[in-house]
Amino acid sequence: RLGTAPLAAVPLAAITYMTGWVLAVGLMRNAIAFCARAYGAGRLGEIGGIVAHYHVLALAALPVLLLYVQAWPLLAGIGRLDALTDSLARTYLDIRVWDVPFSLLTALYSAFYQATGNSRFPMAVSGIVVGTNIVLDYALIFGHFGLPALGVAGSALATVLAQVAGAALIMGTSH
């Protein structure tokens, strides 16, 4: 119902975003080794410091990915995108990149929980994030539940808001 340009723009922008993001999330997942080692050795006091260091990395990833998405015009030129598809993809990227600290903090706390023997809670949080994203996509793309119809921008905003909710949930319940 949105048209060809939005259906072309979102996957192109999303894969561009994910290419940069996956490097950062790999770094967050690395925390599992350090947390698990401290937990297994009974050095529980060290885990907070480990997580704090990774917090800094999660927050530092935002300016790096903001810089990375500035390469979009080069990629759009290589792909010979028409102006509308290019514009929509850029809109998506400019909004979507703001989920970086939240999605990375969710990944970090998922690693923490898994390192300490609880893999169910992070899985439940992931399910909530996906469900929230689906509902918000429906609402923000098409303008339901009293929200404006934002199209491609709504798709990106829905993902950012779902990631904010996931980060708040997983960080708010950590101990």
Image: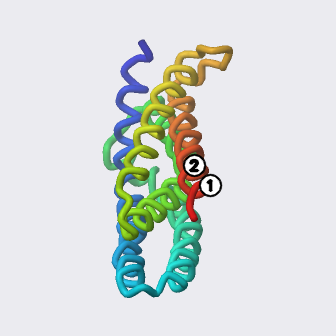
Q: Secondary structure at mark 2?
A: helix
In this rendering, would 164 be left or right of 117?
Answer: right
Number of residues whose C-alpha sits closer than 10 Å to that of mark 1, classed few (under 14), some (14–19) or many (20 or more)? few
Mark 2 — residue?
169
Check whether the beta carbons of the residues at disc 2 and disc 1 lie within 8 A of each other: yes
- Decide: is 134 above or below 3: below
Q: How many marks?
A: 2
Q: Which mark is residue 172?
A: 1
Q: Secondary structure at mark 1?
A: helix
- Decide: is 126 above or below 56: above
Residue at position x 34%, y 47% from top? 15
In this rendering, would 144 be left or right of 130?
Answer: right
Residue at position x 36%, y 77% from top? 36
Q: Quadrant of the N terminus?
A: top left
Quarter of the figure with residue 148: top right
Which of 110 and 99 lies nearest the eye of the viewer? 110
Percent x, y of residue 5: 40, 25
Number of residues whose C-alpha sits closer than 10 Å to that of mark 2, classed few (under 14), some (14–19) or many (20 or more)? some
Question: Which color scheme does this rendered protein use?
Answer: rainbow
Name the amino acid type tagged 2: Leu
In this rendering, would 108 be left or right of 55?
Answer: left
Percent x, y of residue 63: 58, 66
Residue at position x 37%, y 48% from top? 123
Name the amino acid type tagged 1: Gly
In this rendering, would 8 be left or right of 170?
Answer: left
| 3D distance between C-alphas at marks 2 and 1 | 5 Å
Q: Of all residues shown, which one is farthest toward the left?
A: 79
